[in-house]
C-alpha cells in the first residue's frame, strides 16, 4: 500500500489558470496534504496568481516568503521570478538561479526538490503547457516512488507538456482535467483515514 | 496511450541512495571549505543540492564523490563549480518598485546626513551598485556617499569593477530605470561599444569593491544603509541569523536594511531590532534606543 501523501506538487504553463482553478475548486476544505504549484509567468513583484486562485478554494492560498514552513491544507504558489524548492526541513526555499526551460519559476526545480525530500510521500501532477518543463522532475518523483499524474493531452489547452512527460515514461495515471480534483480528493482523503496511527496535526 | 509503465527497479532511487548523496554533498562542501576557503556548509540544502547535481550531470561523473576528487585536484574545475554555487543572477534596477520606494522614503532622510556609508552585501556583477550610484547622483547625494560593494566571489567582483554589460540586457535595464523613477535616460550613464555597454568611469569614484564572506567575515564599518537583496535566501536559518546579527552590528542607529522582496525578518530572531519602513519592498530601519517615559 502507498504511504500517506504529505505534499501534492503541480506544474502548468499555457492554460494553467483554468486548470488550477478547476482542480482547487473541487478539493475539500480539510485537505490533508500541502499543495505546491508552479505556473510559468513573467517576473513581477506581486504574486497575483495566489490572489486569483484564492477565489476558487477555501484552502488558504499562500504567496510564500523564503523559509516559510510548509503546512498541510495550504496552497503555495511559486512567486514570479523565483524558483520554489522544498528544503530538507520542510520549508520553502526560493532561489533566483538561472531559468530552467526558459522559466523561472520552473516545474523541474520544484519537482526534483520535492522528490528528494518527500520520497514516496509526494504526488506529482503535470498539467497543460507548451514546453517540456516538469517531465524530468516528474520522472524523478516516479523513481523515488511517488505517484505521478498527468492531465490528458486532449483535455489540455496546450498538450505539449503532459505529452512530454508521458513520452518520458514519467506518468502513472492520465486523467481529464475535470477528474483531477476529485481524484486527488478521493485518494488523499481516503489514504489519510486509513492511517489512524498518525493522528493529524491540525 | 499506455500511461502505466512498470517502475523498473534499477531506475528506482531509494532513500538510502539519497541519504548517501546527502553525505557526499556535505563532504564536497567540507572539502571546498578546507582547500579553497569558501564556506557553503550552512547554505540552504535544497538549492545547493540542485546546483551540485546540475554540475554533476553536465560533467558526466556518476557520483558526487568522484566529482569531489576532481574539485580537489583541478582548480579550474572548482572555479566552474563555484560559478554554479554562487548565484550571480542580477540586473540593473531589479525590482524597480524597490528603487522607487528607496528614492521616496529613504533618500529624504539620507539628505539630512552629512556623510552616507552604504554597504551592498553580495553585489555579484555590480548591476545594482551602479543602479544605486546613479540614483544617488540624481538625488545630489553621490558626493557625500561612500559605497562598499562586497561579494564572496573575487571573479565576480572583477566583473563588477569593470562594469561592462551586454547590450541586449541593457534595454531591459533602461525600462527598469524608468519604472524606478529615473530622472534622465540610462544611456546618459554608459557608453555603447559593439555588443557591450560600459558604465561611466565617474560612477565608480566613490565605490570601493572588496571581497567579503558573510558566512565567515566580520562587521563592516558603521553603515547608514545595508542592501542585501536575494542573498539570504541561499542561507540556512542559522547562517541567516548570524548575518542578521552582523548587519545589526554594522548599522548605525536609524540605519536602513534593504532585503529582497521575498526575504523576511520573521525567521531571523532579530525582528524587534528593526521597524518596518516599507513592507512589500522589504525596507527596514534599525530602531533608536527607547527612552524611559
Image (cartoon, helix red, strand yellow):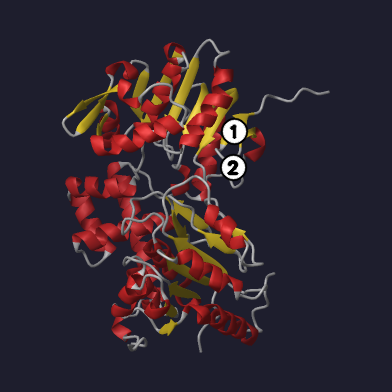
**Residue A104 location in percent, x, y?**
39, 54
Residue B154: name its quadrant.
top left
> What residue is shown at x 32% (from left), y 57% (from top)?
A100
The quarter in which the C terminus of chain B is drawn is top right
Of the numbered discs 1 and 2, the one sitting upstream in the chain is 2
Residue under label 1, please give it: B284
Q: Are marks 1 and 2 in contact (CB under 8 Å)?
A: yes
Q: Mark 2 lies on which chain?
A: B
Question: How busy is the neighbourhood of tag 1: few (under 14 within 10 Å), some, or many (20 plus)?
Answer: many
Identify which residue, A187 or B292, lies in the foreground: A187
Q: Please identify the residue farthest to the right as the structure is shown.
A: B293
> What residue is shown at x 18% (from left), y 46% (from top)?
B76
* Label 1 and label 2 in one chain: yes
Considering only vertical position in the picture, is A40 above or below A28?
A: above
Residue under label 2, please give it: B265
Question: How busy is the neighbourhood of tag 2: few (under 14 within 10 Å), some, or many (20 plus)?
Answer: some
Q: Which chain carries label 1?
A: B
Label 2: element kind: loop
**Residue B262 location in percent, x, y?**
52, 46
Q: In this view, does A68 lie to the left or right of B82?
A: right
Foreground label between 1 and 2: 1
The reply to whether residue A105 is visible in this rendering is: yes
Considering only vertical position in the picture, is B95 above or below B46?
A: above
Identify which residue, B69 or A93, lies in the foreground: A93
**Residue A161 location in percent, x, y?**
35, 70
Amino acid at each position: 500500500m502507498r504511504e500517506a501523501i504529505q505534499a501534492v506538487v503541480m506544474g502548468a504553463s499555457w492554460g494553467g489558470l483554468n486548470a488550477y482553478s478547476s482542480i482547487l475548486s473541487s478539493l475539500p476544505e480539510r485537505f490533508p496534504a500541502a499543495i505546491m504549484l508552479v505556473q510559468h509567468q513573467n517576473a513581477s513583484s506581486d504574486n497575483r496568481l495566489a490572489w486569483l486562485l484564492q477565489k476558487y478554494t477555501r484552502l488558504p492560498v499562500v504567496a510564500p516568503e523564503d523559509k516559510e514552513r510548509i503546512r498541510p491544507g495550504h496552497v503555495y504558489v511559486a512567486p514570479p521570478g523565483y524558483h520554489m524548492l522544498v528544503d530538507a526541513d520542510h520549508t520553502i526555499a526560493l532561489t533566483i538561479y538561472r531559468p530552467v526551460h526558459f522559466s523561472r519559476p520552473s516545474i523541474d526545480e520544484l519537482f526534483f526538490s520535492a522528490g528528494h525530500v518527500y520520497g514516496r510521500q509526494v504526488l506529482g501532477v503535470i498539467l497543460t503547457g507548451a514546453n517540456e518543463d516538469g517531465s524530468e522532475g516528474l520522472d524523478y518523483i516516479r523513481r523515488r516512488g511517488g505517484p505521478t499524474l498527468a492531465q490528458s493531452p486532449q483535455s489540455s489547452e496546450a498538450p505539449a507538456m503532459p505529452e512530454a512527460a508521458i513520452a518520458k515514461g514519467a506518468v502513472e495515471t492520465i486523467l481529464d482535467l475535470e477528474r483531477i480534483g476529485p481524484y486527488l480528493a478521493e485518494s488523499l482523503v481516503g489514504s489519510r483515514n486509513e492511517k489512524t496511527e498518525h493522528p493529524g496535526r491540525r | 496511450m499506455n500511461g502505466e509503465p512498470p517502475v523498473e527497479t534499477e531506475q528506482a532511487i531509494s532513500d538510502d541512495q539519497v541519504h548517501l548523496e546527502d553525505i557526499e554533498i556535505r563532504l564536497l562542501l567540507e572539502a571546498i571549505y578546507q582547500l579553497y576557503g569558501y564556506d557553503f556548509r550552512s547554505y540552504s540544502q535544497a538549492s545547493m543540492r540542485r546546483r551540485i547535481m546540475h554540475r554533476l550531470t553536465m560533467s558526466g561523473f556518476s557520483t558526487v564523490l568522484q566529482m569531489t576528487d576532481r574539485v580537489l585536484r583541478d582548480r579550474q574545475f572548482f572555479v566552474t563549480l563555484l560559478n554554479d554555487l554562487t548565484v550571480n543572477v542580477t540586473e540593473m534596477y531589479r525590482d524597480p518598485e524597490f528603487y522607487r520606494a528607496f528614492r521616496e522614503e529613504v533618500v529624504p532622510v539620507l539628505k539630512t546626513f552629512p556623510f552616507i556609508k552604504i554597504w551592498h552585501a553580495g553585489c555579484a556583477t555590480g548591476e545594482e551598485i551602479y543602479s544605486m550610484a546613479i540614483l544617488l547622483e540624481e538625488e545630489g547625494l553621490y558626493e557625500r556617499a561612500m559605497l562598499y560593494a562586497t561579494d564572496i566571489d573575487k571573479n565576480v567582483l572583477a566583473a563588477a569593477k569593470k562594469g561592462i554589460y551586454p547590450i541586449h540586457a541593457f534595454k531591459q535595464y533602461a525600462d527598469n530605470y524608468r519604472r524606478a523613477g529615473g530622472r534622465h535616460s540610462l544611456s546618459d550613464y554608459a557608453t555603447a561599444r559593439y555588443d557591450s555597454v560600459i558604465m561611466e568611469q565617474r560612477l565608480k569614484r566613490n565605490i570601493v569593491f572588496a571581497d567579503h564572506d558573510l558566512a565567515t567575515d566580520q562587521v563592516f564599518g558603521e553603515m547608514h544603509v545595508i542592501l542585501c537583496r536575494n542573498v539570504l535566501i541561499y542561507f540556512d536559518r542559522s547562517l541567516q541569523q548570524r548575518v542578521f546579527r552582523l548587519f545589526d552590528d554594522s548599522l548605525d542607529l536609524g540605519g536602513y536594511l534593504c532585503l529582497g522582496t521575498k526575504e523576511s525578518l520573521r525567521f531571523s530572531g532579530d525582528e524587534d531590532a528593526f521597524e518596518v519602513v516599507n513592507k512589500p519592498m522589504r525596507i527596514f530601519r534599525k530602531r533608536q534606543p527607547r527612552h524611559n517615559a
